[in-house]
Image (cartoon, grey):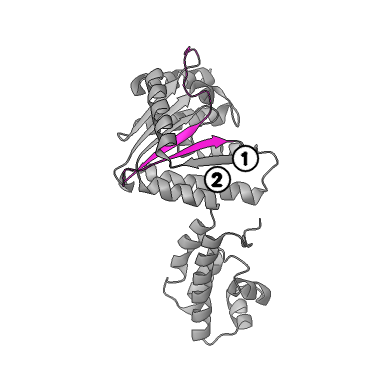
């Protein structure tokens, strides 16, 4: 999808777009400018300005900045860049980001790749670039940007929530993107593992028992006491809210944590793996 194109079936995004477009048009008309005059003033063609105002094209950040300056909006138009940028994330990512923002506790087990909230930008890009059928360059950048935006919740200033991650040893040793990239990813894990609100554990491959062999999943415990579970599989991710299902995964996650190394032992284990990649 082009950076300018609108996804017609994304209702939430289109609602944001309608509000942005309405403001752009009102500011332009208040300035007494035609679409052609406005386009010339901001350095874009009449066809593009018309498409933006009809909601068929997405205004890029530089378009909004130029409009703000030409129309004398004093930052009011530029302020919409954040709304447009977040709305452009894939709907699945937006929904997950909202739930993560509402959670007081996030628990996740991964046995294929490093969890998205723990990934470096280079690691995330390597993951999306390896997808088959392939993403376009624009789609890769869109997915990477969305993933990095979700990581904001790890910030100490993002609220009082706690995180528990269990990574299978295989995710530490799988050289996605090459050795140098994996070194930086392991360093990132060590960095996040030092945060006071994060417990990061590793379950070694030599463990005779691993309750997570069915695949990766995550649990979000929300402020209202409800639990939402995500079970991840190729081509689809299942969302569960039924207590009968979420309770099963809660029990499974507790067993996985008990089978894994302690957080302190896990950081030492990651340091060991990092040292092996550097030799």
Q: Does label 2 or label 1 sit earlier along the sequence?
A: 2
Residue at 45 percent of width and 17 percent of height: 272
Vertical comparison of 171 with 49: above or below? above
What percent of the width, then of the height, locates residue 158?
33, 47
Task: Identify the secondary structure beneath mark 1.
Answer: loop
The part of the chain drawn in magenta is: 206-233
In the rendered structure, does residue 231 fall within the stretch colored magenta? yes
Whether residue 261 can be seen here: no
In the rendered structure, does residue 191 fall within the stretch colored magenta? no
Crowd around label 1: few <14 · some 14–19 · many ≥20 (10 Å): few
Residue at 31 percent of width and 43 percent of height: 225
Task: State the residue position of label 2.
Answer: 144
Task: Identify the secondary structure beneath mark 2.
Answer: helix
Vertical comparison of 25 with 91: above or below? below
Task: State the residue position of label 1.
Answer: 235
Residue extending furthest bottom?
A: 32
Whether residue 51 can be seen here: yes
Residue at 40 percent of width and 18 percent of height: 259
Residue 202: mark in rendering = none
Vertical comparison of 72 with 186: above or below? below
């Amino acid at each position: 999808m082009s950076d300018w194109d609108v996804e017609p079936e994304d209702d939430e995004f289109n609602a944001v777009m309608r509000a942005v477009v309405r403001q752009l048009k009102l500011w332009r008309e208040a300035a007494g400018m035609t679409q052609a005059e406005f386009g010339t003033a901001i350095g874009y063609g009449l066809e593009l300005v018309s498409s933006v105002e009809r909601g068929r094209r997405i205004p890029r950040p530089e378009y909004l900045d130029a409009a703000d300056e030409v129309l004398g909006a004093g930052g009011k138009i530029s302020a919409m860049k954040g709304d447009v940028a977040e709305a452009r994330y894939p709907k699945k990512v937006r929904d997950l980001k909202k739930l993560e923002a509402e959670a007081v506790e996030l628990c996740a087990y991964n046995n294929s790749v490093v969890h998205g909230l723990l990934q470096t930008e280079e690691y995330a890009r390597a993951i999306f670039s390896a997808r088959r059928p392939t993403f376009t360059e624009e789609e890769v950048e869109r997915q990477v940007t969305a993933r990095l935006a979700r990581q904001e919740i790890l910030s100490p200033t993002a609220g009082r929530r706690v995180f528990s991650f269990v990574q299978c040893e295989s995710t530490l040793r799988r050289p996605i993107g090459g050795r140098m990239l994996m070194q930086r990813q392991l360093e990132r894990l060590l960095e996040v593992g030092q945060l006071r609100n994060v417990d990061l554990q590793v379950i070694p491959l030599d463990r005779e028992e691993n309750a997570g062999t069915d695949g990766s999943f995550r649990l979000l415990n929300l402020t209202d006491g409800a639990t939402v579970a995500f079970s991840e599989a190729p081509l689809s991710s299942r969302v569960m809210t039924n207590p009968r299902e979420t309770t099963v995964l809660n029990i499974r996650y507790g067993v996985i944590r008990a089978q894994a190394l302690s957080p302190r032992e896990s950081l030492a284990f990651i340091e060991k793996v990092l040292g092996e990649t550097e030799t």
